[in-house]
Amino acid sequence: MASERELKRRPPDHGVGLEMVHAVIALGGGTPAGGDTQVLTSRYLDTRERELELSQIGLRARGNRDQTQARWTVKIGATPDLRGISEAAEFEMDGCWQTLPPTLVVALRCVGVQGRLLEIARFKTLRERWLVDLEGVELEVCLDSVTVDSPQAFSFVELEVEAPERGILDLVIDELERRFPSVGPSPQSKLATALMSVPRLRPAEGPIRARAGDLGVRLGQLLDAVEEQPTPWASSTQGCQRC
C-alpha cells in the first residue's frame, strides 16, 4: 500500500497554472524549465448503485489508449480538506485495458461488491510534470489539462503537488495563497468533478448502505495483505510479459 498526500488547486486556465508551478519551483530555489509531458486516458468504474462512490473508493484504469497495457489503481479516501490537501491509501497494479486484474476482482467480491462494474467517467489528461527539491524533500508537481469525454464533455485545469510530509505541503500552500489569493483549493477529486453533470443518487438502502461504512477499510486491508511471491527461479529469468 502507498499513502498519497497531495495538495490540489484549480487555476482558471493553463497560463495561471504555469505561473503557480513556477512559484513552487522558485520556492525550492530552482529555475523554471519545461516539464516532462505525457497524455493519459483515465477510465473509472463503479456499480450501478455506486457502491464504490458511497465508500469513497475510486477505481480506474489509466494509461496510453494506443497501448495494450494499463495501470489499475484503487484509491481510498481522497477527499480534499479545507486547505485542499487530500490523503489517500493507494493500491496500484499493472494489467490490460480489456480486463480487471484478478486480484482486484477477488478483493471486490470478498468485501461484498457483487454488482457488475460499469464505466462511469472517462477523461484525457495532458500532464506536465516537474520534480522540485524543497528543504531536502522531493515534491512531484503536476499541471493537468483535463478534457472530460464522459459523462459530459467539458475541460478544466488542475495543479497537484505531492509530498511525503504534510508540513512541506503547508509551506507550499502558504506561498500559493500569498501569490494567488483568488485560486482556492480544489473542492473535490477529478472524478467527482467529471460526475458533476450526473444527477445525485438517492441514498442507498438495505445491504448496500450497510456495507458502505467500512467497505473502504476492509478493501484496503485485503489489498494490503496481497503481495507478489516470486518463484524460486525468478532471479534467473526475465520478468513476465503481461497481456
Image (cartoon, rainbow, N blue to C red):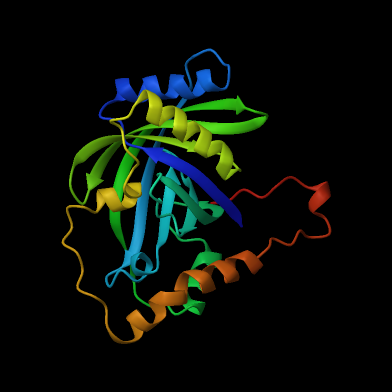
Q: Nearer the viewer, residue 37 or 23?
A: 23
Farthest residue toward the bottom?
206
Q: Nearer the viewer, residue 71 or 213?
A: 213
- Point 41% across, 58% down: residue: 58
| Quadrant of the rendered image containing residue 175 | top left
> Is residue 209 toward the left or the right of residue 153 in the image?
right
Q: Nearer the viewer, residue 22 or 208?
A: 22
- Point 40% across, 40% down: residue: 8
- Point 34% across, 65% down: residue: 53
| Quadrant of the rendered image containing residue 177 | top left
Q: Looking at the figure, which quarter contains the N terminus?
A: bottom right
> Is residue 12 toward the left or the right of residue 208 in the image?
left
> Is residue 90 toward the left or the right of residue 200 in the image?
right
Q: Position of residue 30 (x, y in %)?
A: 57, 16
Q: Position of residue 5 (x, y in %)?
A: 53, 47
| Quadrant of the rendered image containing residue 9 | top left
Q: Position of residue 141 (x, y in %)?
A: 49, 31
In the displayed structure, 29 sits above or below 207; it is above
Can the viewer see residue 223 in this picture?
Answer: yes
In the displayed structure, 216 sits above or below 235; it is below
Q: Position of residue 169 (x, y in %)?
A: 52, 38
Can the viewer see residue 127 in this picture?
Answer: no
